Amino acid sequence: MPYVPRAPRSHSAPPCSPPPPWRGGRLRARTAATNPPRRAAGPGFRTATAIEQGQTATASASVGDYLYWVFPAAAGQVPTVKATVKLPEAQTRHGRTTWQLDVYDGLRRRQACTSGSQTATATQQDASVDLSCRLRRVRPWSEAWANDPLPGSYYVRLTVVNLPEQDLGLPLTTEITASTRDVGGKHAEGGELSPLTPAVRAGATQAPDAEPSPDASESSAEDTSSHTAAEPNGGWGSGWWSDRWVWTVVGGALGALAGVGGYTLTRGRGFRRPPAAG
């Protein structure tokens, strides 16, 4: 019978976050230009590792861990999250595993995926499994009762939801990329809200019986300080410029030309003065 993993309770985790994992995953973010050092990730929203748009984050963890990332998204963008789980060796596994990718907004509301494979099942012979989730367009504002995506931080959670109990704790690696696409001025709308960017505190999770070290260095304190997701290059809002301005100017010019042409065709020859008698 397949085993659905459950973790022990944690009093430090927020009420709406899932239970903590058995072990904390070790994360590192990398880009084409730089390769920052590996960072530890905690078990919940408050310890999510921040990444930028288009950045690829990698994690070395164990089967059964919860892995969290957080990335920014601005109004007028359509976020897409892709994840690849590189599974343990086939001879060490005992059956199928089902993986799930969830995305939450800054209010920790689970957002629906419009396309992509949010849940995927890997057989014992599969070497990896791919998941993806494309969200709806981020709106600059929303009604109080709606669950529309809003500008701010978006949390990504990757975990296994169904597996044989013997596979718990096997090592694995993951890669995840969060990208966005601007949809253009045809979807632009008024309104503006402050970005939903709650502070996160990325760092290692200690055991319940562990005691804090009095010799913690300043660098360690800086690494685990609270921070928010980085603001996108274009800001949180869609800005005043959009392709609607181009169509407005082009439409105005065509309207003026049509008016001049219509007047030229319909004005006639005008009044003729009769010739003088002579």
Image (cartoon, rainbow, N blue to C red):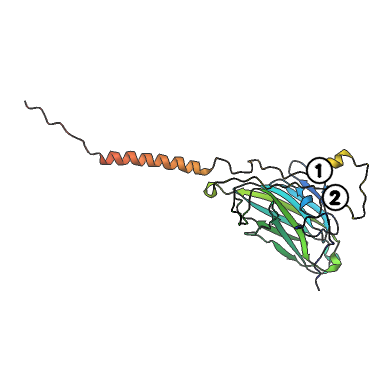
Callout 2: SS: loop
Q: Is residue 93 above or below residue 274?
A: below
Identity of the residue furthest to the top in this view? 278
Question: 145 or 245, which lies in front?
Answer: 145
Mark 2 is surrounded, within 10 Å at the Cα level, by few (under 14), some (14 to 19) or many (20 or more) other residues, namely some
N-term mark: 1 or 2:
2
Please tell me how crowded label 1 is: few (under 14), some (14-19), or many (20+) other residues with Cα within 10 Å.
few
Q: Quadrant of residue 278?
A: top left
**Residue 204 - label:** 2
Farthest-out residue, front: 144
| 17 lies above or below 165 | above
Relative height, residue 258 to residue 63 (above, below): above
Residue furthest to the left in view is 278
Calculate the distance from the C-alpha at mark 1 to the C-alpha at mark 2: 12 Å
Residue 125 image-quadrant placement: bottom right
Q: Is residue 73 visible?
A: yes
Give residue 161's position: percent from left, percent from top. 77, 65
Identify the amino acid type marked 2.
Answer: Ala
> Between tags 1 and 2, which lies in front?
1
Q: Amino acid at mark 1?
A: Ser
Residue for badge 1: 225
Q: Quadrant of the N terminus?
A: bottom right
Residue at position x 91%, y 47% in the image: 212
Image location (x, y in percent) of residue 192 = 59, 45
x, y percentage for residue 42? 81, 52
